[in-house]
């Protein structure tokens, strides 16, 4: 009987441990954000940023113009100028 326990116990341990190990290894890190901010009316690139953006965020350009993001497609965030 002890002979069978020595054989079955390691097999049982591996059977329970392997799914737990693979579950933790399968999580990939989240992708780094990278967006080109584009003026929607002129299609001119305003800037490039590496922060998460969402619709409604605002950007102030170097010439003190304020832009609000109206849509995001893949790596381009389109903004309209606020007067």
Image (cartoon, grey):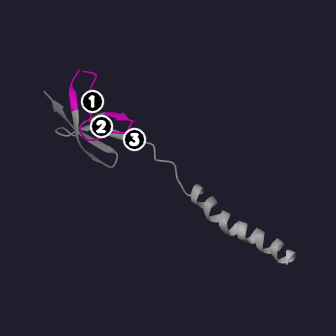
Name the residue that disc number 3 marks.
Answer: 34
Residue lying at 47% horizontally and 47% vertically, measured from the top left: 30
Check disc 2 and report its element: helix, strand or loop.
strand
Tag 1 near tag 2, CB within 8 Å? yes
Is residue 65 depicted above or below 46 in this figure? Answer: above
In the structure shown, which secondary structural element does the residue marked by tag 3 occupy? loop
Q: Is residue 49 magenta?
A: yes
- Neighbour tally class for label 3: few under 14, some 14-19, many 20 plus, Cα within 10 Å: some
CA distance for labels 1 and 2: 9 Å
The residue at which mark 1 appears reads as 59
> What is the quadrant of the C terminus in the image?
top left
Q: Nearer the viewer, residue 46 or 77?
A: 77
**Vertically, is 60 above or below 34?**
above
Q: Position of residue 71 (x, y in %)?
A: 23, 44
Q: Is residue 16 magenta?
A: no
Q: Which residue is label 2 attached to? A: 37
How crowded is the residue under tag 1: few (<14 C-alpha within 10 Å), some, or many (20+)?
Answer: some
- The image quarter containing residue 10 is bottom right
Residue 23 appears left or right of 30: right
Q: Main secondary structure of the magenta part?
A: loop
Percent across and percent down for residue 45 are 28, 36
Quadrant, the N terminus = bottom right
Residue at horizontal 86 percent and vertical 74 percent from the top: 2
Q: Which residues are magenta?
A: 47-67
């Amino acid at each position: 009987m002890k002979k069978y326990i020595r054989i079955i116990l390691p097999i049982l341990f591996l059977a329970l441990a392997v799914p737990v190990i693979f579950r933790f290894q399968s999580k990939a890190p989240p992708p780094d954000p990278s967006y080109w901010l584009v003026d929607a009316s002129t299609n001119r690139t305003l800037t490039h940023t590496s922060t998460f953006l969402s619709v409604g965020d605002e950007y102030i350009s170097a010439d003190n113009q304020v832009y609000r993001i109206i849509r995001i497609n893949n790596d381009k965030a389109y903004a309209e100028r606020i007067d």
